[in-house]
Amino acid sequence: MSKQLDNDISVSGQINEAMVRQLAGQGIKTIINNRPDAEEGGQPGNAALQSVAESLGVKWVYLPLIAGQKPDPVLAQNYRKAIDEMPKPVHVFCRTGRRSEMIHQAAMNLPSNGQGVKSFDVVIVGAGTAGISVATSLLKRDADLDIVLIDPSSTHDYQAAWTLVGAGEYAQKATRKPLAELIPKGVKWIAKAVTGFLPGENKVALEDGSTVGYDQLVVCPGLKLNWAAIEGLPEALGKNGVTSNYRYDLAPYTWELVQKMRGGRALFTQPAMPIKCAGAPQKAMYLSCSNWEEKGVLNNIEVEMYNAGGVVFGVPTFVPPLMEYIKRYNAKLNFMHNLVKVDGPGKTATFEVTAADGSKALVERKFDMIHVVPPQVAPDFVANSPLANSAGWVDVNQHTMQHVKFANVFSLGDAGSMPNAKTTAAIRKQAPIVANNIVRMRKGLNPLGEYDGYGACPLTVEKGKVVLAEFSYGGKLAPTFPLNPAVPRRLNWVLKKHVFPALYWFGALKGHEWLTKCATQADKAKA
């Protein structure tokens, strides 16, 4: 099985003649062999494999590394020369792929003179929505930028659709694509995990001990779903009625539970803020109730929402329509209830309840189904870095998204300290602003403070209807359309289910900046 090292470079263990033909059929133009001949019996010889490859028009490069040795500078330079000059895409291999990965990383850390740390114009940590969007926005403004995305993931998810997957309204597989297919052309990709930041040296530290240098750094690795913060939850998930739409593999289980349930008690939980899409915990409840209502079993089910906070929704305008649905579904609201423990086999949830006087007590509640939303925090390598504020988020100006201490560092998306709703819609507005500010900085100009905190939360209150909540800093309404935003509409359902996914895959990730107020080429020309 192969994996991507870069958008043009894949790696695998030992290949044979049949696999050479298969790689050629997949469009591979160059193969690099990093394994010495005769390491073990039955190993295909280099000459035989090369002959097959060249007969198929595939270039062949032999750069062997003895097992147990580390790549020396000469080998790294020869490898770098090969991948720079040979036709792409390139496939590299050794016995297991590990040596090839070591050589690749050593080569990527070489600057033009072959020594020291590899450096880029812009390093982007995280290849999620924010990372890919800002990379494409940067290239729109300056196609000559040397940009690298650093992310160990092999896939990319459209997480906004998982609520619909959990309601049987969207295909799970349609929410995930190979990351290699989404890396913008002209942008490099390092498939490694970041372990820390050295902003004083303009470097990012990677899991293999190497570092990558930068002129500008964009930190957008998303946030950490802290499942382990709830006792017993990691072991309970995916069975005994315990589920969550916040995980790709669990959203279908939510739908399975909803379909099977004909009576009993269903619990829905929401942790303290901030979380990805503040409305998502409620969406799971509304869509489940809508299904039960449609099947005529809702009256047999006790529906209970347990919220660690004290309000239904943070923007008052949208509370009345939500309360209408809560009454319609006869759902019981429980505020200041924080989930602290889940006993899957015992089907028991334990909540820490905070009273008005600040005192705390534990209460238990039996369930037949529970939809859990975990606490959400900054990734450890961010929270423990010089870039973090006291809460662990990247400490940036909420308008320019520029770091308050390190001027060449920016952050957007879920990892930033901006007090906006953590939604995909927010990133759609943030990405071109960060890109524009970086390009301005590279020209010696000051960043433009344009981001107003815009975010959007399509609240799926029933199957076929959505309240499209759009707002900016301070809960100020920011509707895109000239319609009452508090009214549930079928139009919004069509947008949520059909239009927004298409705009995501073929719009935001491709550099289209529709409905964004941001300085672009015209401002660049004026500057």
Image (cartoon, rainbow, N blue to C red):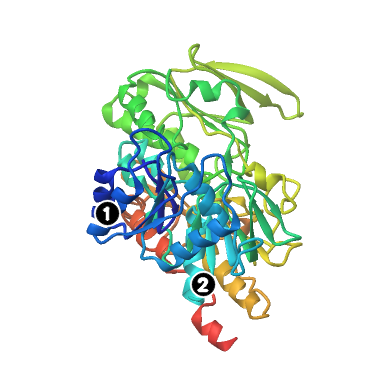
- Counting residues from the start of the chain, the first of labels 2 and 1 encountered is 1
- Give the residue furthest to the bottom: 526
The foreground one among 422 and 330 is: 422
Is 323 positioned to the left or the right of 463 in the image? right
Q: Position of residue 317 (x, y in %)?
A: 53, 51
Residue lying furthest top: 346
Using residue 465 as the reference point, say whether residue 215 is left or right of it: right
Residue placed most toward the observer, 405 or 217:
217
Q: Which mark is residue 64?
A: none
The answer to whether mark 2 and mark 1 are in CB contact below 8 A is no
Residue 47 shown left or right of residue 408 in the figure? left
Q: Which residue is mark 2?
A: 517
Is residue 248 something one can see in this rendering? Answer: yes
Q: Kindly identify the residue that appears in the image at 60 percent across and 28 percent down.
A: 228
Q: What residue is rendered at 45% in x and 35% in y? A: 326
Rendered residue at 39%/30% (across/down): 254
Residue 9 sits in quarter: bottom left
Up-down: is 355 above or below 57? above
On screen, 488 above or below 85?
A: above
How far apart are labels 2 and 1 at the CA level?
56 Å
Secondary structure category for the residue under label 2: loop
Q: How many marks on residues? A: 2
Give the label on residue 51, or none.
1
Q: Quadrant of residue 472?
A: bottom right
At label 2, which amino acid type do we have? Lys
Give the amino acid type for the residue marked by disc 1 in the picture.
Answer: Ser
Q: Nearer the viewer, residue 133 or 300?
A: 133
Q: Nearer the viewer, residue 498 or 412?
A: 412
Q: Is residue 426 visible?
A: no
